[in-house]
Image (cartoon, helix red, strand yellow):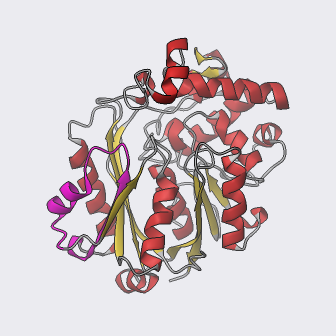
Amino acid sequence: MSFSNAVAVAGVGETDYSRDSGRTELALSLQAIGAALDDAGIAAAEVDGLMKWFVDTSSEAEVAVNLGIPDLAWFGEINQAGNVGAPLVAHAAAAIHAGLANTIVIYRGVNGRSGRRYGRGDVTGQGGRGAGAFTEPFGLLTPQHGLAMSARRRMFETGVTSRQFGQQAVIQRKHANRNPRATFHDRPLTLEDHQESRLIVDPFHLFDCCLESDGGGALVLTRPELARERRLDRPLALIRAAAQSGPGQSSPVRRTAARLFAMGGVERSDIDVVQIYDHFGPFVLFALEDYGFVEDAGHFVEDGGTMWDSGKLPVNTSGGHLSEVYLQGMNHLIEGVRQARGESTSQVPNAQLSFVDTGIGTGAVILERSEA
């Protein structure tokens, strides 16, 4: 199904980002939702749909009661550990397009540093059960353990280097240095800093790894007519296409890409700016190749191709998971909307199409700018 720009992301909102929020995850979600509704000019009572990350601890019913939503017509989650941001957008947009709901809020609130930490396996660990029975007894306890093996294999197959991984981390830090919301807004990074930082799991250096963060974010999806009615003073971010692939399938990036670009009726060369899920920085390079944007991402990054102000295809322009915040793709979606609306702190001039991947091919979205 093609959305044909029939659904808009009318509002985005987030909390401050920290290592110790001092608030519950519910409070973070509600704060982010309130900011997104204010941004959209939509009242909580007009919301009739809620969707959340599977691992989010704040249920839709709990959020609805706290917001005062009178009639929750659509709600749900996607049962996957982390990378579900774009699939949630696809599901919410499909519901609105089908007339099952009018205005849907997608939210994420997480104390990922002061509470349960991904880096310790508090969220992703399986206790030796299920698939974990084949990996955890042998030391693959956290995402970085398994993904490091994938990264090392890619290095062997293609010749991509740790210095090229480091260059992407440096580029994203430069973007974060322009973004006052970013965790590392005031801390520059050099390639030497990256290379001299300790190895976490070979080949991942410290600065190849995402942050552990406390914070919240939210999106408001509705029909373009309502969005324009409430905010006539700015461009809209319309959903041109949204697709997902199951993580158990082979080559999920290529499968997602084939459906996404066919649905959107656009070519890779039409995309102006890209946000890619960077739980570990090397996977930005892998995704650029697998989505078909470039053939040799290592040299493309090395030559500054992903830099905001001079690169051919700016990537992770808010700093991403490496330098802004780790919100499991929510911050990438927010930045994608801001690029489409012309509001980013590293704004790509005249950006018409904004691409967002929220997890190794498991989901991606193309957003299109529509003038006010």
Foreground residue among 234 and 273: 273
The residue drawn where x is 58% and y is 44% is 247
For the question of whether residue 350 can be seen, the reply is yes
Quarter of the figure with residue 208: top right
Q: Is residue 366 visible?
A: no
Specify whether residue 61 is painted magenta: yes
The quarter of the displayed image where residue 312 is located: bottom right
Q: Quadrant of the N terminus?
A: bottom right
Q: Would you say 297 lies left or right of 217 here?
A: right
- The location of residue 237, given as percent across then percent down, is 51, 72
Asked if 155 appears above or below 95 in the picture, the reply is above
**228 vs 142: above or below:** below
Q: Residue at x 35, y 69 (%)?
A: 104
Q: Position of residue 42 (x, y in %)?
A: 29, 75
In the image, the segment drawn in magenta is 44-70
Q: Is residue 186 left or right of residue 158?
A: left
Q: Is residue 190 above or below residue 13?
A: above
Determine whether 307 is above or below 60 in the image. above
Magenta span has 20?
no
Between residue 347 and residue 207, name the one nearer to us.
207
Residue nearer the viewer, 178 or 318: 318
Residue 225 appears at what percent x and percent y? Answer: 43, 86
